Image (cartoon, rainbow, N blue to C red):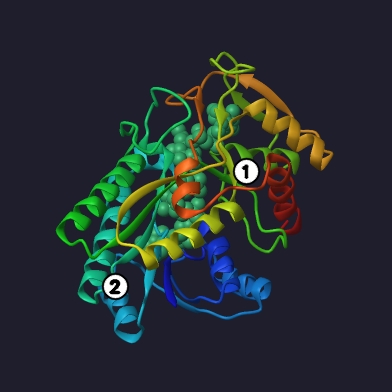
Amino acid sequence: MKILVTGGLGYIGSHTVVELLNDNYEVIVIDNLSNSKESVKDNIEKITNKEFELVIGDVCNKDIVEDIFKNNKIDAVIHFAGYKAVGESVAKPLMYYHNNLFSTINLLEVMEKYECRRIVFSSSATVYGKPESLPIKEDFKLSTTNPYGTTKLMIEDILRDLYVSNNDWSIAILRYFNPVGAHKSGLIGEDPNGIPNNLMPYIVKVANKELECLSIFGDDYDTKDGTGVRDYIHVVDLSLGHIKAIEYVLKNKGVDEYNLGTGKGYSVLEMVKTFEKVNNVNVNKKIVERRPGDIDACYADSRKAKEILGFEAKKGIEEMCLDSYNYVKKNL
Ligand code: NAD
Ligand code: UD1
């Protein structure tokens, strides 16, 4: 089976390519290197001892995408390519709508033309907006609070409409909670440019003395210790969720949404303390104002992915903290 992976050199994509190769899928990656490096290819090949084809190109360029389908029989696509920074999407909405929507529409048009109608799409728990209750189930009301989230919701709607237009499509929409961690080898992981927005990469940089102090955004939330609670999922578990989703879309038709999380929520303080303990380091921290737009708590009801896809996250926060730090220490 040949799988096209868009954005396959990125954080989640690279870990998923490893698992696909480990499972003997043939893989073609298209990536424009806007948020990744070409050297990731060598590292994936080192980990797996297998090779794959890389097309350096933009999914917004239809000719490039069409060439891939003309020259290969693609059985299914995993579509990671897109921009993902919430704050940047508020500052540059057109850039986000352009990249995330055009790339997806191009891809789907070419897939329709070549009658490849199986796709796994990277959505996000951000489509739940401010959830009314917890844990979050897939049938909760959807809403967004920033352009990034809106692109995800718009693409979900496009995919649902596409299935209505042609029941031959098989579409798995995966809503990720908070991916963290890295491959055990330390060869691939998360490497954000500049000052990170997300919690784990920030903790890692403070531990590594690249940044001075972690600002904890608020300690007066309605949670166990007042700090924000999230559902952190190890990126290797998340990648295995994509393997289950690919197996599913290869066998079944339809469109459906799945939460990929652990179903457990941990607070900022719990994450920092665990990180300090397992890595035996100190993380300077101070409590500051809440970050605008943040919610108290967010964690998944992960039963649907288990029941239908057979996916269950296995790794705990200790392993997430260890692997995140290990990657950065190895790549100083
Ligand atoms: P990432 O930025 O590390 O990876 C995305 C990859 O896509 C990068 O390698 C980038 O170079 C490439 N890319 C972007 N636009 C492209 C285009 N037009 N053509 C070709 N390549 C392009 O991000 P990630 O964390 O691996 O996320 C993957 C997907 O999962 C994204 O769609 C993201 O929105 C979604 N997601 C991520 C998170 C998270 O916390 N990391 C959470 C929820 C959803
Ligand atoms: C963010 C995005 C969300 C995206 C998700 C996963 C925002 C508003 N939301 O969510 O759309 O789907 O990442 O990529 O950016 N925290 C600190 N100090 C920090 C950083 C974070 O205290 O320096 C806290 C936050 O307040 C939150 C928790 O840590 O309680 C997790 O934050 P973060 O990693 O940014 O993820 P989300 O807020 O869940």
Question: Which of the image's four quarters has the N terminus?
Answer: bottom left
Q: Residue 261's x, y, as percent? A: 53, 42
Q: Residue at x 32, y 54 (%)?
A: 100
Which residue appears farthest toward the front when viewing the image? 307
User: Distance between the Cα atoms at labels 1 and 2?
Assistant: 37 Å
Q: Vertically, is 232 above or below 288?
A: below
Quadrant in which residue 205 is drawn: top right
Q: Vertically, is 215 above or below 154?
A: above
| In this picture, residue 261 sits left or right of residue 210 | left
Q: Which residue is mark 1?
A: 201
Which residue appears farthest toward the left when viewing the image? 165
Please tell me whether mark 1 sits on a helix, a strand or a loop: helix
Q: Residue 195's x, y, as percent? A: 57, 42
Q: Give the mark nearest the N terminus, 1 or 2.
A: 2
Q: Residue 143's x, y, as percent? A: 30, 33
Amino acid found under the numbered disc labelled 2 = Cys
| In this picture, residue 315 sits left or right of residue 34 | right
Q: Dot 1, crowdedness within 10 Å: few (<14), some or many (≥20)? A: many
Which residue appears farthest toward the right when viewing the image? 280
Q: Which residue is mark 2?
A: 116
Residue nearest the viewer, comparing 211 with 106: 106
Quadrant in which residue 332 is drawn: bottom right
- Under 8 Å from ligand 1: the CB of mark 2? no
Q: Residue at x 69, y 28 (%)?
A: 270
Count every numbered label the image shows and give the total: 2
Residue nearest the viewer, comparing 256 with 60: 256
Amino acid found under the numbered disc labelled 1 = Pro
Q: Is residue 81 visible?
A: yes
Q: Residue 279's x, y, as percent? A: 80, 42
| Tags 1 and 2 touching, CB below 8 Å | no
Please tell me whether mark 2 sits on a helix, a strand or a loop: loop
| In this picture, residue 104 sits left or right of residue 198 | left
